[in-house]
Structures are given as structure tokens and as C-alpha cells.
């Protein structure tokens, strides 16, 4: 009987809101109606009306000073100039090489004789996504996909060495070529430049699939032994050069839109993005290969995009969430010495390593164990570096990441 029912007197209304602002983070704010009734009702009304209506402006003026301050501090109300635009990532796949392809790659493109072309085959692990959503099998391999462009189709390519799943957005001119490749045919009339695009995107491969499996196994064994001996590893072209070109553009865009925040620590003056969703996607793609090399199974903790235009990074060791680091050189500007291969110094007990990474190269080392640093950049030089951090898979954080 309804008449016998009473309201549980302990029920308290709380609400959780998720918002994003220009440091690139998504945050969750929880608020209780019991402790802050005006605040709670105001935000609920604000969301229901979709904006600060004339009526709500009157209510806003009647709020307490602390409630108005809270709305500003939490960036629920903010100046229009600070509004976060939703920046998505798209890696175009066109007939021509992308403008931001690293010079080091552009200058080393091989000549393509007919005999050389005949050595290439088609990557068998590719899927063309034409629907808005991925099917279930694929979807679980693509976290953080809110960052990807909604334009379709998307070509998902499994990179054969490091096993990364790379997304490309073919142009209308490239699409028939991709469809031919998916049907098992390499069109005979491809220009040299288009052929290079397909090779750099890991769509055309030099070896056959079973050869890559053998090569991967041998590489993993060699790298594991090298890591054990030297305590660090360098991976050349860790990122496909076509993807890297798009990543350079994306990082410039998030910087331009104000998504990086300033860090002025004793170690460095730089601007950063913490857990940028695209960078986090790449991190999830690295973990499998990494776990074939490391002495312990690891899981990702967080990522950092670091943009340096003044200082380098003072000598330091990292905190516990950076047990293993991968540092990738993404965007040196200008592409010339010393910034082109801006060295990362790592002090090991016996040796000092000066690692020179070209764009797209990565270095792996234990950030918590070995002091590392970068020297200051010359005036007018700047560099964007992606940092990926990993910990033992059983690690439980003592405190939240800052
Ligand atoms: Fe560090």
C-alpha cells in the first residue's frame, strides 16, 4: 500500500557534474544539497536552462560571496574567452606527404624502383570503419575515443612491430586506393609520393606477416637483454611518421587553444597537458609491447605533454608513479641542431647517457632510479615532448596524482 510508505529520512540529494576546462582535464564535481542548497539549486537551474538567463542573473546576484567565488573557482561560470573548445584529432591520409612530416624522414625517403616496389605487401590487419561506432571487439581496444574526429571512414591499422593500433582518415582521393588495398590489390599507378605515404603509415609493409611475428619475437628478446644490461632502450620511429605529423599539429592546436598549463618549478619552466586524451590513447597502445620487454608487468599511470621554450629540465629523479618512463620527441622547432635531437641526459651508476632522439623516437628508462635532465634550449628554439609513465601492475597509489 502506497499509504504505508514513508521517505527514508536519511536521503540526501547530491549531484555530480563533469566539466572540462582549458588545462585539458575533465573533472568531476560533487555537491550536496544538504550542505550547499543555494549552490546546488543554482547549478541545477543553470544546467536546465542551458545558460545564464536574465532570471538566473538575478538569482546569481543574490548568492553569497562564497557561492559566487566557488562558481568561478570551479570554472562553472567563466569568461567566454576561457571556454574550452572541443579539439578532436584526425590523422589525414592523403595522396601527398603531410606538411608536418619530420624533415629527417622526408630527407631519407628511398628511391622507389619497380623492383623495390615489388618487395612490398599489404598489411593484413586493417579495418575500415564506416559506421559512427566501432563494433564491440574493436571498441574495447580504443579507449579515449572521444578525442577522435567523427568524420568517417576511419582506417584502423595495426602497426606490425610495436603493435599499436593507428587511426587514419583517408581523403576522398585516397579512399579508392584503400578499398583496393583492402581487396588485396596494390594499384599499379600509384605515384612515388603516395607509395611513400602508404609505407610510412605502415599500410604497405616490407615483410610478410609471419616474418614480422618472428622479427618481433627476436626484437623482444634482443631488447630485453639490452635493457637488462644498459638500463635503457631507444625505439626508432616508435610512432608512425604519418601519425607523428598529425600529432605535431594536434599538440600545436591544443597549445594555441590554451589547453596547456604553466609549470614553474625549480626544475623547469614549461607548459604541460596532464592526461591529454590522445596521449593517453597512445599510452594504452604501448603497454602490450612494453610488457614483453620489462622484467615486471606494468600498467599506465598518467601522461604528460611538455612544451619547452625556455629552460630544459633540471637534474632530478621522478616520483613513484614514474617507475618506468617513455619519453618521445614529437615536435622540435626549428628542425635543426641542437633542438632536432635535443639530448636527454641520464646518469647511470657507471655511465652518463646522452640520448639524441629524432622526431618520433622514444627512450625507455626507470625515472625513479636514475637522475635525468635536459639542458636549456637556445633562444628561439622550442620542443614538445610526450611523456608516458608506468608502474608495476600491483601498484596502488598512496595519494591522487597532482
Ligand atoms: Fe623526470
Image (cartoon, grey):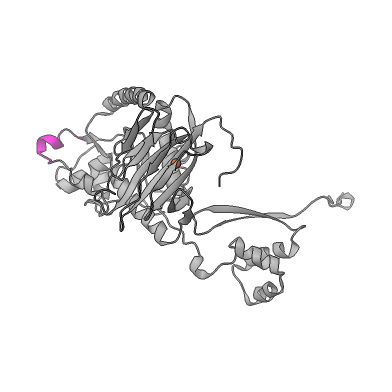
Where is ligand 1, by quadrant? top left
- Kindly indicate the quadrant of the structure image that contains residue 186: top left
387 vs 230: above or below:
below
* Residue at 57 percent of width and 57 percent of height: 19
Span of residues in magenta:
112-120
Farthest right residue? 4
- Image side of residue 316 versus residue 56, left or right: left
Q: Position of residue 372 (x, y in %)?
A: 41, 39
Percent from the top left, x then y, of residue 384? Answer: 36, 50
Q: Quadrant of residue 231?
A: top left
Magenta stretch: residue 114 in it? yes
Indicate the position of residue 349 as horizontal and vertical percent values: 40, 28
Residue 105 image point, x, y percent: 22, 45
On screen, residue 146 above or below 345: below
Residue 4 in view (yes/no): yes
Q: Is residue 18 above or below residue 371?
A: below
Q: Residue at 41% of width from left, 31% of height from top? A: 290
- The foreground one among 91 and 130 is 91
Residue 190 can be seen, yes or no: no
In magenta stretch: residue 252: no
Residue at (15, 42) in percent of width and height? 188
Amino acid at each position: 500500500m502506497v499509504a504505508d510508505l514513508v521517505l527514508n529520512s536519511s536521503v540526501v540529494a547530491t549531484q555530480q557534474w563533469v566539466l572540462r576546462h582549458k588545462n585539458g582535464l575533465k573533472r568531476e564535481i560533487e555537491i550536496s544539497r544538504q550542505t550547499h542548497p543555494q549552490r546546488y539549486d543554482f547549478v541545477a537551474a543553470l544546467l536546465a536552462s542551458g545558460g545564464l538567463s536574465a532570471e538566473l542573473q538575478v538569482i546569481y546576484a543574490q548568492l553569497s560571496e562564497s557561492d559566487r567565488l566557488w562558481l568561478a573557482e570551479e570554472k562553472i561560470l567563466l569568461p567566454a574567452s576561457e571556454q574550452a573548445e572541443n579539439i578532436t584529432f584526425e590523422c589525414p591520409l592523403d595522396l601527398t606527404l603531410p606538411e608536418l612530416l619530420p624533415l629527417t624522414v622526408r630527407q631519407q625517403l628511398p628511391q622507389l624502383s619497380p623492383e623495390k616496389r615489388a618487395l612490398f605487401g599489404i598489411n593484413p590487419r586493417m579495418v575500415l570503419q564506416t559506421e559512427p561506432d566501432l563494433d564491440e571487439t574493436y571498441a574495447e581496444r580504443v579507449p579515449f575515443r572521444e578525442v577522435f574526429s567523427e568524420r568517417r571512414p576511419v582506417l584502423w591499422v595495426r602497426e606490425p612491430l610495436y603493435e599499436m593500433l593507428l587511426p587514419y582518415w583517408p581523403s576522398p582521393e585516397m579512399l579508392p586506393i584503400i578499398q583496393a588495398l583492402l581487396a588485396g590489390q596494390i594499384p599499379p599507378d600509384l605515384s612515388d609520393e603516395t607509395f611513400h605515404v602508404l609505407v610510412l603509415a605502415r599500410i604497405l609493409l616490407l615483410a610478410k606477416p609471419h616474418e614480422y611475428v618472428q622479427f618481433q619475437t627476436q626484437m623482444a628478446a634482443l631488447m630485453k637483454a639490452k635493457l637488462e644490461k644498459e638500463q635503457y632502450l631507444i625505439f626508432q620511429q616508435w610512432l608512425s611518421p604519418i601519425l607523428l605529423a598529425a600529432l605535431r599539429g594536434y599538440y600545436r592546436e591544443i597549445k594555441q587553444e590554451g589547453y596547456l598549463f604553466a609549470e614553474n618549478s625549480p626544475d623547469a619552466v614549461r607548459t604541460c597537458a596532464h592526461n591529454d586524451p590522445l596521449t593517453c590513447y597512445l599510452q594504452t597502445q604501448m603497454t602490450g609491447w612494453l610488457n614483453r620487454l620489462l622484467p615486471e608487468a606494468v600498467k599506465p599511470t598518467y601522461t604528460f605533454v611538455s612544451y619547452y621554450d625556455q629552460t630544459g629540465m633540471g637534474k632530478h629523479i621522478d616520483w613513484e608513479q614514474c617507475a618506468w618512463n617513455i619519453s618521445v620527441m614529437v615536435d622540435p622547432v626549428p628542425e635543426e641542431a641542437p633542438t632536432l635531437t635535443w639530448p636527454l641526459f641520464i646518469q647511470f651508476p657507471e655511465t652518463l647517457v646522452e640520448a639524441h632522439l629524432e622526431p618520433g623516437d622514444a627512450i625507455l628508462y626507470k625515472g625513479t632510479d636514475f637522475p635525468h635532465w635536459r639542458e636549456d634550449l637556445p633562444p628561439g628554439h622550442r620542443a614538445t615532448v610526450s611523456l608516458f609513465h608506468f608502474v608495476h601492475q600491483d601498484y596502488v597509489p598512496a595519494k591522487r596524482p597532482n
